[in-house]
């Protein structure tokens, strides 16, 4: 039997925040800046064609109970994708998804996909895009890591002088979701809380040899001695949460050469569960999806271990007590206790889809270029998979987030496709309804790897995410610093609209435009602001302002028109980060390197692939570049984003760090001097969501 984890319980928002926190911006490499030569805009479909009733109907449908909150990988999201595809078909835009099976006689065996010429002609008889043979679907399907399951090979046996006892999976132990697959057989060393934090004056590994052993560690945080000074208190408050994480403890055990790690609940936690009862073993959901820690690791029922003794006769429970009273580590090998731990975790994948429609440009030359209009259609389902801010379970309808954006994009597709041929955009327009955004921008990350029109020829991406709660005609526009002249372009588009716009230059942010910006596509991001129903079941259709949604849609239409009127696409610009700030002081560590980790996990290697480095940052001065994969920091292996943050934030501003990076298959060592966040060239991190919402 197996336990399922619905992964991501640790909140991608948190990882996102980290990603932003540790970085921003990409070397601007491409060509000379292009001037924004303007041409008279094409006669455009009238704003009047935008139908409030259709916007309302789309939101109502997508946020209805049948859609179950549209969780990626679930039936509700499949239903939503099919409904969206049907609307695109109805609108008369051509399918831009996966090629269907080759039609007999049309497909040369062996010819690479995507090089054939398809005849999936968009409405209006415009020449077709060069597409793969066969009828296309509207769906661009992709797989994603969804969780982990415990395989039947998983076992734990404990050897003691009296004999060997096999423990019961699920009752006595359960692997941690980030455990490596494999086995370890060794003596057990008690290593306190499993923390090495020199800056805090705490090292559970001091004086014990964990090399080749299985370490036994307590969950949570030790009672640290405190100097009582405010600076000291601040440092601790900053650093401690990370040291309490089991993923950190696994990394630390591995870095001390341990062969495996067993964790038990600490006593207060055990007592909190109600005296006699023991806390439940950690569900995989709480520990899954944090990468492979490179060491086998399992949670152990506390009472199995508390009686184990050291050579001096002290029990694990007594050692724990001693740590508490002395406020100091007290680690020791256990006498004659061995463990044989075998972990078999099966990664569970699921499938979902982006829904893509394409309207071929009317200009034979410019039609080779594209404007992408995007919105994610997935949401949080019943909230059990993470991301929810609700106290109570329930379907997260996601009317604003982001049925609103989808409704707007569908309406744009309909209006643009219905326009007389002479009023159609000169360039190709791709309508992209992304899946799995809530799980970490997965759909847009997939799209930019498999774009319908190559990204070099994608002049801009316009993202609509949460555009249904306009108040007082206020609209926020992000990304205006990502392309030359973009801000002026937005001003032109909005002239006379009565909208009151606020601008943010930043190209990175908590939605799909980020994936495009990281690939050097200029982006614009429209949203009407966060609200108290955000990521709660109460984000329902009745709360939206449909007249406001119409205004946003009308502005988007004008933006498309203005973009299409440019002789050349706006030259991509890296942004210097935006002046959000206050939140950073509350939440974040103070070191600053200036790297921007890529969202998608590095394929085939352990490490952190960089989407870019911030201009003028320590990372840039150290010579780090987009595409580099960071695999080590000061002798510590860095296997993923979690480990990167642990490694980095154990350091102080001003310290020199040695970074090991892989670049084009070579291993380089670079040296960086860490900056201070908030200091020179160290923009405070955004709050993980755009600032400026009302
Ligand atoms: N729609 C939100 C982002 C957002 C928040 C836009 C507030 C406008 C105002 C998006 O669906 C989301 O929830 N993003 C995640 C981050 C993502 C990388 C998983 C978030 O903000 O936590
Ligand atoms: Zn959203």
Image (spheres, rainbow, N blue to C red):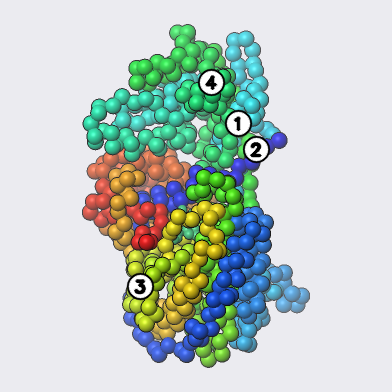
Local crowd at mark 4 within 10 Å, few (<14), some, or many (≥20)? few
User: Up-down: is 231 above or below 258?
Assistant: below
Distance Cα–Cα, label 1 vs label 4: 22 Å
User: Up-down: is 3 above or below 97?
Assistant: above
Q: Is residue 365 visible?
A: no
Residue on which disc 2 sits: 3
In contact (CB < 8 Å): disc 4 and disc 2: no
Q: Percent from the top left, x then y, of residue 140?
A: 62, 65
Residue on which disc 3 sits: 500
Q: Percent from the top left, x then y, of residue 595?
A: 36, 53
Mark 4 Cβ and ligand 1 under 8 Å apart: no
Quadrant of the rendering where the C terminus is positioned: bottom left
In contact (CB < 8 Å): disc 1 and disc 2: yes
Residue on which disc 1 sits: 174
Q: Percent from the top left, x then y, of residue 693?
A: 38, 61
At a point 44% along the width and 80% down the height, the residue shown is: 558
Closer to us: mark 1 or mark 4? Answer: 4
Q: Could you tell me which secondary element the residue under label 2 belongs to?
A: loop
Quadrant of the rendering where the N terminus is positioned: top right
Distance Cα–Cα, label 4 vs label 2: 27 Å
Task: Give left or right: position of 692 versus 133.
Answer: left
Q: Percent from the top left, x then y, of residue 123?
A: 63, 84
Local crowd at mark 3 within 10 Å, few (<14), some, or many (≥20)? few
Residue on which disc 4 sits: 275
**Residue 651 quadrant:** top left
Q: Is residue 69 visible?
A: yes
In front of the other: 574 or 619: 574
Q: Which residue is the extreme one toward the top?
A: 313
Distance Cα–Cα, label 3 vs label 2: 51 Å
């Amino acid at each position: 039997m197996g336990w399922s984890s619905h992964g991501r319980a640790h909140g991608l928002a948190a990882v996102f925040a980290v990603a932003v926190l540790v970085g921003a911006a990409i070397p601007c490499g491409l060509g000379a800046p292009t001037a924004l030569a303007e041409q008279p805009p094409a006669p455009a479909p009238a704003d009047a064609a935008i139908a409030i009733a259709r916007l309302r109907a789309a939101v109502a449908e997508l946020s209805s109970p049948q859609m179950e909150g549209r969780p990626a990988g679930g039936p509700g999201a499949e239903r939503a994708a099919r409904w969206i595809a049907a609307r695109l078909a109805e609108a008369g835009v051509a399918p831009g998804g996966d090629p269907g099976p080759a039609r007999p006689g049309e497909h040369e065996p062996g010819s690479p996909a995507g090089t054939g010429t398809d005849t999936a002609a968009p409405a209006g008889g415009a020449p077709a895009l060069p597409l793969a043979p066969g009828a296309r679907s509207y769906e661009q399907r992709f797989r994603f890591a969804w969780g982990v399951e415990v395989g039947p090979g998983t076992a734990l046996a404990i050897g003691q002088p009296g004999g060997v006892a096999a423990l019961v999976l699920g009752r006595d132990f359960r692997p941690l979701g980030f455990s490596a697959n494999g086995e370890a057989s060794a003596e057990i060393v008690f290593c306190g809380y499993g923390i090495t934090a020199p800056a805090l004056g705490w090292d559970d590994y001091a004086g014990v040899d964990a090399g080749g052993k299985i370490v036994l560690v307590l969950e949570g945080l030790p009672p640290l001695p405190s100097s009582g000074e405010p600076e000291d208190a601040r440092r601790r408050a900053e650093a401690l949460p990370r040291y309490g994480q089991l993923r950190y403890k696994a990394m630390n055990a591995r870095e001390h050469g341990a062969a495996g790690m067993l964790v038990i609940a600490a006593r207060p936690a055990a007592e909190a569960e109600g005296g006699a009862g023991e806390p439940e073993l950690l569900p995989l959901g709480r520990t899954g999806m944090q990468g492979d820690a490179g060491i086998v690791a399992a949670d152990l029922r506390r009472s199995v271990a508390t009686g184990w003794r050291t050579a001096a006769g002290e029990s694990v429970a007594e050692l724990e007590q001693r740590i508490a009273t002395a406020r100091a580590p007290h680690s020791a090998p256990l006498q004659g206790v061995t463990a044989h731990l075998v972990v078999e975790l099966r990664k569970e994948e699921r499938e979902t889809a982006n829904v893509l429609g394409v309207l071929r440009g009317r200009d034979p030359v410019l039609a080779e270029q594209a404007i992408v209009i995007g919105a994610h259609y997935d949401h949080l389902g019943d909230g059990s998979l993470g991301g929810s801010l609700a106290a109570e379970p329930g379907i997260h309808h996601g009317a604003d987030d982001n049925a609103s954006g989808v409704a707007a994009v569908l309406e744009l597709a309909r209006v643009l496709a219905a326009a007389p041929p002479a009023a159609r955009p000169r360039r190709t327009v791709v309508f992209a309804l992304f899946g799995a955004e809530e799980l970490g921008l997965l759909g847009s990350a997939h799209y930019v790897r498999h774009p319908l029109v190559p990204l070099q020829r994608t002049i801009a991406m316009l993202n609509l995410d949460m555009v249904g709660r306009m108040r007082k005609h206020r609209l926020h526009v992000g990304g205006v610093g990502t392309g030359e002249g973009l801000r002026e372009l937005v001003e032109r588009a909005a002239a006379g609209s009565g909208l009151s716009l606020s601008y943010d230059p930043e190209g990175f942010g908590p939605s799909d435009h980020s994936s495009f910006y990281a690939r050097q596509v200029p982006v614009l991001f429209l949203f009407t602001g966060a609200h108290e129903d955000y990521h709660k079941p109460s984000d329902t259709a009745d709360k939206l302002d449909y007249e406001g949604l119409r205004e946003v849609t009308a502005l988007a239409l004008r933006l498309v028109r203005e973009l299409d009127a440019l002789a050349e696409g706006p030259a991509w610009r890296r942004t210097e980060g935006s002046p959000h700030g206050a939140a950073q002081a509350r939440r974040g560590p103070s070191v600053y390197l200036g790297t921007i980790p890529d969202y998608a996990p590095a394929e085939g290697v352990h490490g952190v692939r960089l989407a870019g480095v911030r201009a003028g940052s320590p990372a840039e001065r150290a010579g780090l570049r987009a595409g580099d994969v960071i695999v080590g920091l000061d002798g510590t292996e860095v296997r993923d984003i979690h480990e990167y943050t642990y490694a980095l934030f154990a350091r102080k501003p001003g310290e020199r760090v040695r970074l090991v990076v892989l670049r084009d298959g070579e291993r380089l060592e670079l040296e960086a001097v860490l900056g201070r966040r908030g200091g020179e060239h160290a923009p405070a991190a955004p709050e993980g969501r755009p600032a400026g919402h009302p």
